[in-house]
Image (cartoon, rainbow, N blue to C red):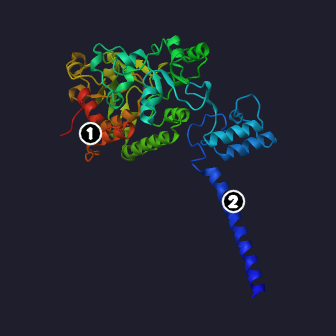
């Protein structure tokens, strides 16, 4: 009996040892793939040594191989950005993976290298609306300590508005108290003394076709400054360019919420493209978008909601050095679009800022244009003071039904778009308010 028990005991020990080995393997797998210990977010982070789309233990292994001369050095392998790759970079990368780093270096949306101290508790906004929209959508509005004068004076709008009190955005419903925060100047002329007085941990800035504003703020205040947009590039108004959620999420510790919004955006876009991707060019309406305040003749070269919704932007392919191009009325007549969209800022119905539908429909020069002859001229949200993917997704669904009513006949635009904006902003009824103010087309 004792011998049998001994044999059984040894067998038990072997089983236990085997189990421990399997557990150890499982832990290694978890370290490599766990979303808790691996950043699947912003990829331009120093520490993402193998330069893939995720920062995880594979980057630690890559840095070790670089140190031993087995792998070529990469920019991001220098995790602590001290100019050399060493064991210190391994330690820094592990801290980033575990979300315990005290310092983080990354490349911002204008390709500038920025280093911040973490955690970030105070954010000053010297940009357009990209920063404030994204922080609110991520649930980090409590970190905002300063806003631009445009946001404060013009109801969260940044451009010149003849009737400021009528300019509406979802933020007025979702976070009305933000407009009472101290100001930091304007997006193109920041007040450095005001920024310093607020003692922010980081400043979000707008960078147009140069890096002047972002570099000026950082150089003269010593406060890390992150450029959120560079409108001179080709990434504007693209529904698949959602890096702002990853970047800001990484900075303020809202990585999971950022990934949630990205996944949701991709899901809603895919629902639309499942239909529109099958539509041949011959059945796609030719669309002209009259953007901003200039009468009819300013239009975006690229605008994803038009393309994704199954339309053809007649201005696509035109030459310009910016996101917008100005064209002659004669060119619009030559393009002969099937549909004209009017970029409409949400105001009161009594005040239309910019182009008016009736002016285009009655313009004697445009009576030969298909869109005018068939009265297919509609208001749409467009973009203003930055690009908001949330309203962009809702607009795409609205345009899809405008362009292809038969293929989207079962879609209740108001109901579905209210749900979309609620997912981003947490409040129901936002699309209904926007649609009424913008006088969007209403289906029976």
Task: List the single residue furthest toward the front.
Answer: 2
Q: How many labels does the image show?
A: 2
Whether residues under marks 2 and 1 lie with C-beta atoms below 8 angstroms apart, the answer is no
Q: Which residue is drawn at 68% across and 59% down?
A: 25
Q: Quadrant of the C terminus?
A: top left
Instruction: Assess disc 2: are there few (<14), some (14-19) or many (≥20) residues with their C-alpha within 10 Å of its C-alpha.
Output: few
**Which SS class for mark 1?**
helix
Q: Which of marks 2 and 1 is in front?
A: 2
Residue density around tag 1, few if under 14, some if 14–19, many if 20 or more, within 10 Å = some
- Residue 346, quarter of the rendered image: top left
Could you say where residue 249 lies in the image, as x and y percent from the top left?
Answer: 51, 35
Location of mark 2 (residue): 24
Above or below 294: residue 88: below
Residue 320 screen position, x and y as percent: 47, 19
From the top left corner, tell me how far across and down residue 254 is, in percent: 50, 38
User: Which of disc 1 and disc 2 is earlier in sequence?
Assistant: 2
Residue 80 relative to residue 295: left or right:
right
Q: In this view, does 221 lie to the left or right of 354?
A: right
**Residue under numbered circle 1:** 414
Q: Residue reaching furthest bottom?
A: 1
């Amino acid at each position: 009996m004792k011998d049998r028990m001994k044999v059984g005991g040894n067998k038990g020990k072997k089983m236990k040892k085997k189990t421990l080995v399997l557990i150890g393997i499982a832990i290694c797998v978890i370290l490599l793939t766990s979303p808790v210990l691996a950043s699947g977010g912003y990829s331009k982070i120093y520490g993402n040594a193998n330069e893939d789309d995720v920062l995880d233990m594979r980057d630690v292994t890559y840095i070790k191989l670089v140190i031993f001369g087995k792998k070529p050095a990469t920019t991001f392998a220098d995790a602590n950005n001290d100019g050399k790759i060493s064991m210190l970079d391994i330690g820094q990368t592990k801290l980033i993976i575990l979300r315990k780093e005290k310092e983080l270096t990354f490349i911002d949306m204008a390709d500038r290298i920025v280093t911040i101290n973490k955690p970030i508790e105070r954010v000053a906004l010297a940009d357009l609306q990209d920063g404030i929209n994204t922080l609110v959508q991520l649930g980090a509005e409590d970190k905002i300590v300063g806003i631009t004068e445009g946001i404060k004076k013009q109801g969260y709008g940044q451009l010149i508005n003849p009737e400021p009190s009528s300019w509406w955005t979802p933020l007025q419903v979702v976070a009305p108290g933000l407009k009472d925060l101290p100001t930091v100047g304007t997006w193109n002329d920041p007040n450095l003394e005001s920024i310093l007085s607020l003692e922010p941990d980081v400043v979000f800035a707008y960078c147009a076709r140069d890096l002047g504003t972002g570099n000026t703020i950082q150089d003269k205040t010593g406060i890390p400054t992150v450029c959120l947009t560079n409108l001179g590039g080709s990434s504007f108004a693209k529904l698949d360019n959602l890096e702002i959620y990853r970047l800001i999420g990484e900075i303020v510790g809202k990585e999971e919420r950022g990934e949630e919004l990205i996944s949701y955006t991709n899901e809603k876009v895919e629902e639309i493209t499942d239909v529109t991707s099958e539509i041949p060019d011959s059945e796609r309406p030719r669309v002209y978008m009259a953007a901003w305040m200039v009468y009819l003749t300013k239009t975006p070269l690229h605008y994803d909601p038009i393309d994704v919704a199954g339309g053809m932007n007649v201005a696509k392919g035109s030459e310009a050095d910016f996101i917008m191009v100005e064209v002659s009325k004669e060119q619009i007549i030559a393009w002969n679009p099937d549909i004209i969209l009017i970029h409409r800022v949400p105001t009161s119905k009594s005040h239309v800022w910019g182009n008016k539908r009736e002016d285009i429909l009655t313009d004697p020069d445009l009576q030969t244009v298909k869109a005018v002859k068939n009265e297919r001229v509609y208001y749409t949200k467009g973009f203003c003071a930055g690009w908001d993917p949330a309203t962009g997704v809702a607009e795409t669904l609205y345009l899809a039904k405008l362009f292809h009513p038969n293929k989207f006949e079962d879609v209740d635009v108001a109901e579905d778009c209210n749900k979309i904006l609620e997912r981003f902003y947490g409040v129901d009824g936002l699309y209904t308010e926007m649609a009424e103010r913008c006088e969007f087309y209403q289906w029976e």
